[in-house]
Image: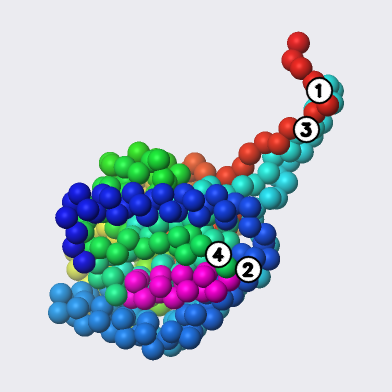
Amino acid sequence: MLLMADNLTVQLHEIGRNARAASRLLATVSAEKKNAALLAMAEELIAQKATLLAANALDLDAGKKNGLSESMLDRLRLDEKRLSTMAEGIRTAASLPDPVGRILKEWTKENGLRFQKISVPIGVIGIIYESRPNVTSDAAVLCLKAGNACILRGGSEAIHSNRAIAAALQTGLAKAGLPAAAIQLIPTTDREAVRILCEMNDSLDCIIPRGGKGLIETVTKYAMMPVIKHYDGICAVYVDKSADLAMAREIILNGKCQRPGVCNAVETLLLHREIVAEFFHHAGSALLDAGVELRCDAATRSLLPESLQTHSLIKEASEEDFRTEFLALILAVKVVDSIEDAILHIETLGSHHSDAIVTSDAAAAEQFLNGVDSATVYWNASTRFTDGGEFGFGCEIGISTDKLHARGPMALEELTSYKYLIRGKGQIRG
């Protein structure tokens, strides 16, 4: 749907006003009523399954015609299992403790003033995202549970799926007696909508871009409200000289191959010089058998077993490969001489998303855990666990690589702010 610029501005500002009105109501709605609405929304997703899958089929057909990669089509695809997972995610959110109204801290001063710091909704949250239509549900659900209204703008490749999901969720809201304007999807694929949304600081309290680097940079450039960023997932695994190499093989295969098109997949492999040849005996063939292209630096290639020297999937790495989020079966491989070199590489070329060390040396692990300044840092575990559900938070709105307000999986608590309540008995300041 394309709209004239003036009409688009009018439409988006109307959406913003409606969202602001809905947010004021949501801020005072009981936890029970929000949970009832969430359960109704989950029921509607299942009830409208045929409509949702038909809409998704239109997006998949268009994606194939437009040459989307297999990994991107996988991100776009809905099926009965994924719809059931979405609905179960909503039910899980309904079962979680309400994040609003928590007493974060309380104290009394000598003058008798009683202070409370309590959690409150942020208000209206704008969310701009690409590809994955399940984000429409996840974002709307989390915002609602935290008492926020949301304005959603999905990517053009999922426009039919997003419209159908948003409509189902709004139907559930209405059945539960809450305003449909609490969840609104911008109905156009016009890119101008992003700029207009970014300038609506009278309606939006913050904006969250979830997608590629270009999208995030555009939002950051134009936004007139706080931006919570979800930058690239250039995730690294460092295999230390004391690593259990069988464990390292499984962690790297999982991190690279389970779902290569997601932000917590491994993109960079750092190997301590002393274990390169042995590592490739353990894991090299497994990665190659899985179809992973290994882009190796010169030091790695010089240490490869002779049997792998001429393998067609082993390529020469460029410097740019070590700062790239491939989102495909490609892995950049580099030799380092020490844990300090591994940490320096990650800090210099990584994206501060999710990084891991495989080692049996507890002191080395603690040095890595404390030295790597990323949102999530792992010892002997796959980076694929960077996910709200895997952390026990329920569904998430994204993985923040910022340091202020929210960092790592953004779930319910991260969608609240706080305020202070002060109760007195006539005190005045002297």
Residue 332 visible from this viewpoint: no
| Crowding at mark 2 (Cα within 10 Å: few <14, some 14-19, many 20+) | many
Residue 326: image x %, image y %? 27, 65
- Left or right: 361, with 200 as reference point: right
Q: Which residue is mark 3?
A: 423
Q: Are marks 1 and 4 in contact (CB under 8 Å)?
A: no
Secondary structure, mark 1, is loop
Q: Which residues are magenta?
A: 161-176
* Three-letter code, disc 3: Arg
Q: Earlier in the sequence, mark 3 or mark 2?
A: 2
Type of the residue with mark 2: Asn
Label drawn at residue 178? 4
The amino acid pointed to by label 4 is: Leu
Residue marked by disc 2: 35
Q: Which residue is mark 1?
A: 426
Distance of label 1 from label 4 (alpha carbons): 39 Å
> Quick check: is 78 in the magenta stretch?
no
Mark 4 or mark 3: whose residue is earlier in sequence: 4
Q: Earlier in the sequence, mark 4 or mark 2?
A: 2
For discs 1 and 3, the disc positioned in front in the rendered view: 1
Spatial CA distance of label 2 from label 1 is 39 Å
